[in-house]
Amino acid sequence: MGSDLWQLSAPWWHFILRGLVVFVMVLVFLRFSGKRQIGQMTPFDLVLLLLISNAVQNSMNGGDNSVTAGAILAITLIAANSFVGWLTRRSRKIETLVEGQAEILVHNGHVCDDALRRAGLTQHDLLAALREHDCADVTEVHAAILETDGRISVLTRKERKQG
């Protein structure tokens, strides 16, 4: 019974290769699914994330439930994440590829509907973000920008601040 606890069902490098392939695959899927912070996730976003993690589990471990395979996969995923972080700090092109670019949602009091659509945001999402920044109306906004981390930055018009 104790022997299968540590015994791998495939060569160790299979788990590293599987972990890297799944890491890149999930990174690509999540990159194109939208820019939301964890705190901004809807229940549907959370369910999707949980189901994706469950769906790819067997792709990584190939049915091997040993502690050794789990350790190899955990180390592989941490190393891959660290490597991607290192690459994005060194290359603007890779950073843009992995994290995307900031998107202007409101410019001079006018909502950019195409940008909202591309970001997968609704008018309600935008108005809620503006209220969080103490803006009651879109016309008070010089610029609202969807940052690469999912936050919405809001710059108000100068007239509003003086008046």
Image (cartoon, helix red, strand yellow):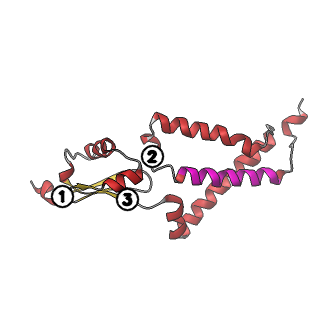
Mark 3 and mark 2 residues within 8 Å of each other at the beta carbon: no
Q: Is residue 40 above or below residue 80?
A: above
The numbered dot on residue 37 is 2
The numbered dot on residue 103 is 3
Question: Counting residues from the N terminus, which is met first, the one under dot 3 or under dot 2?
Answer: 2
Can you tell which of label 3 and label 2 is closer to the viewer? 3
Amino acid type shown at disc 3:
Glu
Residue drawn at (19%, 44%) of the image:
136
Q: CA distance from mark 3 to mark 2?
A: 15 Å
Q: Which residues are magenta?
A: 13-30
Amino acid type shown at disc 2:
Gln
* Left or right relative to 58: residue 162: left
Amino acid type shown at disc 1:
Arg
Residue 13 x, y percent position in the rendering = 81, 54
Q: Is residue 27 above or below residue 92?
A: above
Residue 85 x, y percent position in the rendering = 57, 60
Q: Which residue position holds label 1?
A: 157
For the residue labelled by badge 3, is the local secondary structure a helix, a strand or a loop?
strand
Q: CA distance from mark 1 to mark 2?
A: 26 Å
Quarter of the image where the N terminus is located: top right
Q: Nearer the viewer, residue 90 or 104?
A: 104
